[in-house]
Image (spheres, grey):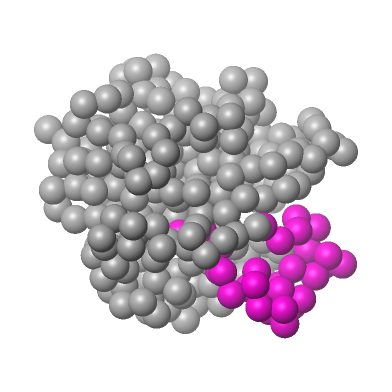
């Protein structure tokens, strides 16, 4: 029996970029607007955050923005992020604080998925921070422009994991490497509705899933590994009629409950 009670999709920012960043070999020259999502999972055993969005200060402080999002060196551009989209603001609307989060599960270490970690820690979050060993090793190598090392190096001890595991009854970490070396998705068994597979950036768009197209940017150009992970998610979804949730697809996001409503 699942311990999951509620699942909230959280819109943490929006990002406008060339579609080929999300679809390998497709969409060059086509600009798309994409949500940057995180998810709050409430279980009988505590609260889990899957991803934490961007670092608000790096976007809004002029000096930090010039340093981290210099268009001459950072081709992705800076996301747009409002005060209301910060994770602590989402929590406050639910009557919660950062201290009410028990586990932060980092799907991968790109800036738009782990950047909010410092703010949560500054707000009193004492949660365990779960990250895969392969992901951490690759990020520390310093070869990925989408990794800002200080997003995750100065905010307490990381709980380093290796492979798939259950976080609690009804919540399973799923290995989906390709986009990054240790990318992880998450299986969530809801108490009433169909199970949900949070793809993270294993699948930015529904197009990645439907057409089995790798993300445009992949670790060591392992687009084949990324396609294998998409097929794995599809196979898992078929087994139990689960819904795969891509992370950067506005059309899909608009089918979800509008915060502070939840899925159950």
x and y, in percent, of residue 171 in the image = 27, 42
Q: Quadrant of residue 65?
A: bottom right
- In percent of the image, x 41 and y 25: which residue is there? 243
**Extent of the magenta region:** 52-79
Q: Is residue 222 left or right of residue 118?
A: right
Left or right: where does residue 158 sit relative to residue 177? left
Residue 116 is a magenta residue: no
Q: What residue do we see at 50% from left, 43% from top?
A: 200
**Residue 72 figure quarter:** bottom right
Q: What residue is shown at x 62% (from left), y 65% (from top)?
A: 147
The picture places residue 172, in percent across and down from the top left corner, at 30, 42
Q: Is residue 102 left or right of residue 140?
A: left
Q: Is residue 107 above or below residue 30?
A: below
Question: 42 or 185, which is in the foreground?
Answer: 42
Q: Is residue 175 above or below residue 96?
A: above
Q: Quick check: 50 above or below 91?
A: above
Residue, x 49% and y 66% (percent of image)?
A: 116
Q: Quadrant of the C terminus?
A: top left
Q: What quarter of the picture does the N terminus occupy?
A: top left
Q: Is residue 79 visible?
A: yes
């Amino acid at each position: 029996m699942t311990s999951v009670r509620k699942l909230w999709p959280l819109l943490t920012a929006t990002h406008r970029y060339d579609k080929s960043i999300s679809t390998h070999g497709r969409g060059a020259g086509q600009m798309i607007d994409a949500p940057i999502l995180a998810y709050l999972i409430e279980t009988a055993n505590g609260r889990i955050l899957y991803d934490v969005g961007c670092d608000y200060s790096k976007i809004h402080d002029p000096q930090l923005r010039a340093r981290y999002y210099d268009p001459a060196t950072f081709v992705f551009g800076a996301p747009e992020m409002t005060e209301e989209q910060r994770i602590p603001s989402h929590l406050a609307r639910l009557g919660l604080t950062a201290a009410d989060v028990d586990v932060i599960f980092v799907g991968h270490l790109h800036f738009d998925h782990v950047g909010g970690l410092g703010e949560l820690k500054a707000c009193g979050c004492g949660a365990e921070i779960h990250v895969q060993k392969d992901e951490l090793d690759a990020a520390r190598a310093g070869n990925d422009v989408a990794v800002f090392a200080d997003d995750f190096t100065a905010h307490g001890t990381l709980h380093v994991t290796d492979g798939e595991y259950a976080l609690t009854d009804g919540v399973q970490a799923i290995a989906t490497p390709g986009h990054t070396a240790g990318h992880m998705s998450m299986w969530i068994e809801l108490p009433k509705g169909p199970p949900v597979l949070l793809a993270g950036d294993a699948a930015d768009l529904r197009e990645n899933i439907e057409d089995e197209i790798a993300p445009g940017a992949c670790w060591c150009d392992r687009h084949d590994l990324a396609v294998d992970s998409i097929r794995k998610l599809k196979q898992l979804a078929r087994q139990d009629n689960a819904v795969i949730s891509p992370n950067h697809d506005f059309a899909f996001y608009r089918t979800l409950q509008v915060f502070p409503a939840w899925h159950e």
